Amino acid sequence: MIDLNSAIETLSYIGVGIVLLIVGTILFAVTTKISEKKLILEEGNVAEALKLGGKVLGLAIVIYAAAVNSISLADMVIWGSFGIVIQIIAFLVVEYILFPKVKLEKKVEEGNIAVALMLLIASIAVGLVVSGSLSYNPLLEYIS
């Protein structure tokens, strides 16, 4: 039998996770100069969809780590928010360090699928690095 408290707690974590994912996606969209929505929905730009999908997946990986490593819902919100900000900053740094003189955003806007796939993979890679770094063990505070 399902415990009602556990079910409510699970639904709370799912709800917070989805809200964090939406907020993170919106924050990522703010960092771009183009309308991802227009390019994907109106123009059918597959490259843009791949790039955005990679960003969403990278964020989901970070939010997953925040949920798994949290000790409470508030803790998940704090670590999830922190992880989202770090994910966005890290992705932008990686993007500009890998190709400092290339306007990758313009390449994707033009439909360059190779660039979009590279950015999708970079988003996932950054998400894995950030999520692996979101390890917090409050019990260790009492040991030191």
Image (cartoon, rainbow, N blue to C red):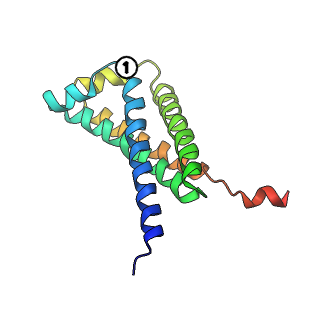
The residue that appears at 49% across and 42% down in the rendered structure is: 126
Indicate left or right for 89 with 7 as reference: right
Indicate left or right for 96 with 108 as reference: right
Residue 95 versus residue 127 in the image, above or below: above
For badge 1, the amino acid type reads: Lys
The quadrant of the picture occupied by the N terminus is bottom left
Q: Residue furthest right?
A: 144
User: What count of labels does the image hold?
Assistant: 1
Task: Count neighbours of disc 1 (C-alpha within 10 A) and say few if under 14, some if 14 to 19, many if 20 or more.
Answer: few
Residue 74 location (% of width, % of height): 57, 49
Residue 53 versus residue 32 in the image, above or below: below
In the image shown, does 50 or 13 lie closer to the viewer? Answer: 13
Residue 19 location (% of width, % of height): 40, 43
Residue 28 location (% of width, % of height): 41, 31
The residue that appears at 43% across and 50% down in the rendered structure is: 17
Residue 88 versus residue 64 in the image, above or below: above
The picture quadrant where one finds residue 14 is bottom left
Indicate left or right for 113 with 104 as reference: left
Determine the secondary structure under disc 1: loop
Q: Which residue is mark 1?
A: 103
Indicate left or right for 55 with 71 as reference: left
